[in-house]
Amino acid sequence: MSTPLIRVRDLRKAYQSEVETVWAARDVRFEAHAGEFVCVYGASGSGKSTLLNLIAGLDVADSGDIQVGDVNVSEADEKQRAEMRLNIAGVVFQDHNLIDEFTAAENVALPLEVRGVPASVARAEASDQLGRVGLTGIGDRLPRQLSGGQRQRVGIARALTGQRAVLLADEPTGALDSVATVDVFTVIRALCDEGVTAVVCSHDTRCRDFADSRYEMVDGRLERRP
Ligand SMILES: Nc1ncnc2c1ncn2[C@@H]1O[C@H](COP(=O)(O)OP(=O)(O)OP(=O)(O)O)[C@@H](O)[C@H]1O
């Protein structure tokens, strides 16, 4: 099999309260290959967000090893982790985090402008990315002129601009109705069929129907499910 795009080994993260130690990640191991849709589900507080934040380099593990593409996230400093998110793995959250004053296309083009890509090239890629998530023709609209599901798909397009091959999504459908939820999972499935690797943490167990591999987070332990 090909080299995994994401490789997590023996990951541990604990939070210490005044009365107890909470294990948000206990000896977590998994890998994801190019084109794989990984769904991580589990009860509230089981550690899904912690895992995603650790892979994204937004949080730091107590121990263990995380490799994303050619970056060893567990050994990278904050700047290298930010570069990893800009170049390899885009992140989306429940809240789409779009800039209200920017059009959909401007939001999608933003990561390219941060990299210094000429505006005309950034605009062309933004248009392509919007097409990939089924939003051809809405590039001129502001976020408030879009539905919740469309906004989240713009967020996914933005997360993948600049040839990023990995999508890390934390509760991407948490604020969406049933139809928009299925639309978002369908779009992620289609992106994975094109070669994107996605790790999606979700309360919504419908995510499992779209995924290639399924894991349940149980008190910080990641358990493979059929
Ligand atoms: N910064 C923090 N300080 C203390 N405890 C934390 C912190 N972040 C997370 N935790 C604890 O770690 C555990 C895992 O939290 P996490 O947010 O990863 O779970 P989750 O499965 O994503 O939950 P939800 O679905 O509700 O978002 C929980 O018990 C949570 O209270």
Image (spheres, rainbow, N blue to C red):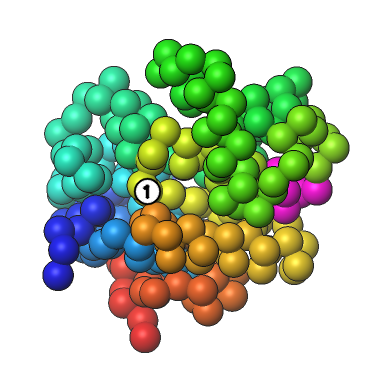
Q: Which residue is mark 1?
A: 166
Q: Is residue 78 above or below residue 155?
A: above
Q: Mostly what secondary structure, the magenta segment?
A: helix
- Look at the image and tell me in which quarter the N terminus lies: bottom left
The residue shown at (51%, 51%) is 170
Residue 211 occupies which quadrant of the picture? bottom left
The answer to whether residue 216 is magenta is no
From the top left corner, tell me how far across and down residue 218 is, in percent.
39, 70
Q: Nearer the viewer, residue 103 or 83?
A: 103
From the top left corner, tell me how far across and down residue 13 is, in percent.
28, 48
Residue range in magenta is: 147-151
Task: Farthest residue to the right: give it.
Answer: 145
- Residue behind label 1 places its C-beta within 8 angstroms of ligand 1: no
The residue shown at (46%, 41%) is 160
The residue shown at (24%, 53%) is 5
From the top left corner, tell me how far across and down residue 18 is, in percent.
39, 42
Q: Amino acid at mark 1?
A: Val
Q: In the shown orientation, is residue 40 left or right of residue 205?
A: left
- Look at the image and tell me in which quarter the C terminus lies: bottom left
Q: Is residue 160 above or below residue 190?
A: above
